Image: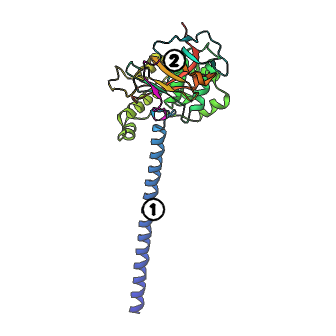
Amino acid sequence: MRKLLAVLCLSLFFLRSDAQILDMLKGRVKDKAVETATSLAGNKVNNLITTQAITTNFGDCDVRNIKDPGFGADEQYTDLCHAEFSENGFVLRPGYYELRVKSFCLQAGTYAPGKGDGYLYAPLKGPKKDIVDKIVKNWYKKQNISQADVQMLLWAIISKANFKNISPELKLVAAQLLSPKEILSLSNMGLDFVPDNVMSEVKMNLPKPVQLVLEAENKMRQFFNSASYNYNELERFAMLAGVNTQRSTINYGTWGLHPGGFWIAYLPSGYSQMKVRIFVPADKGTVNYIPSNDVAVPANESSQRLLLSDVKNCN
């Protein structure tokens, strides 16, 4: 009888111990699941905040084929202000050309172009490149829309603003430049204002220029989420105050080899106006040039990337 009681007690002890161990294991599994879910959620938030809508950068430029700013200084340039422009662009024969077009800022939290910044050609890249390209190209046919309104729409996309929160007026601009399908794709994406404590953690180990871009985008999202905002307020966050003191490795007015087979120099005046100089060599024959295919990228990452438009600035 005593042996039987001892066996029963021992069995109860092990049953209780197994239950405790099982509960402990369940607790650890639950904690691990919560930790994993939190980590995944954190990574997703980080990616949403740090992923750039347009990724074009100086690494996309051809820095091997360049000419000094003084190249072509004594040549006669043909002004393209009154030249015909079609869907195939400007048709250019060998010679020197000059063109003034309107342009757009593609990166918030950077300095406006200065005389110390040299620019080279790069293609438009990034998750939102097709929509950005469509907006700027379609603006040529809808020049009744102000450049400021187009720039605000681009800033909304670049800052990853929640499209549902932008003003009815800006939604109307989008409706004139994009298809319903493209607008729907924008409506299903976007961020709201990210709290300061979250932003601080996200940008903590990032380079200073990247931190400034993320901060500017977040401030712009806050404005887009507000009941009212205007161009001047957004511009204030898009551009850093003062002059960029960082020296550029490419001089202002440097010529670069364009994929179209001709040479080109970008001479911006602020971010909204661009003078372009083109040299078509004699052995190239006739070439076509579409300005809106070009992103003018500075060697200095703290300065603004500029997307050219096909709209002439001949005033």
Residue at 55%, 25% (x, y): give it: 294
Residue at numbered disc 1: 29
Horizontal and vertical percent for residue 240?
A: 38, 23
Residues in magenta? Answer: 59-71
| Magenta residues, dominant SS class | loop
Q: Nearer the viewer, residue 44 or 252?
A: 252
Give percent across and percent down for residue 137. 61, 22
Identity of the residue furthest to the top in this view: 315
Label ID, residue 277: none
The answer to if 155 sits in the magenta stretch is no
Residue at image point 49% right, 39% down: 48
The location of residue 268, given as percent across then percent down, is: 46, 18
Q: Check disc 2 and give the amino acid type.
A: Val
- The kind of residue tagged 1 is Val
Q: Which residue is mark 2?
A: 276
* Residue 310 seen from this side: yes
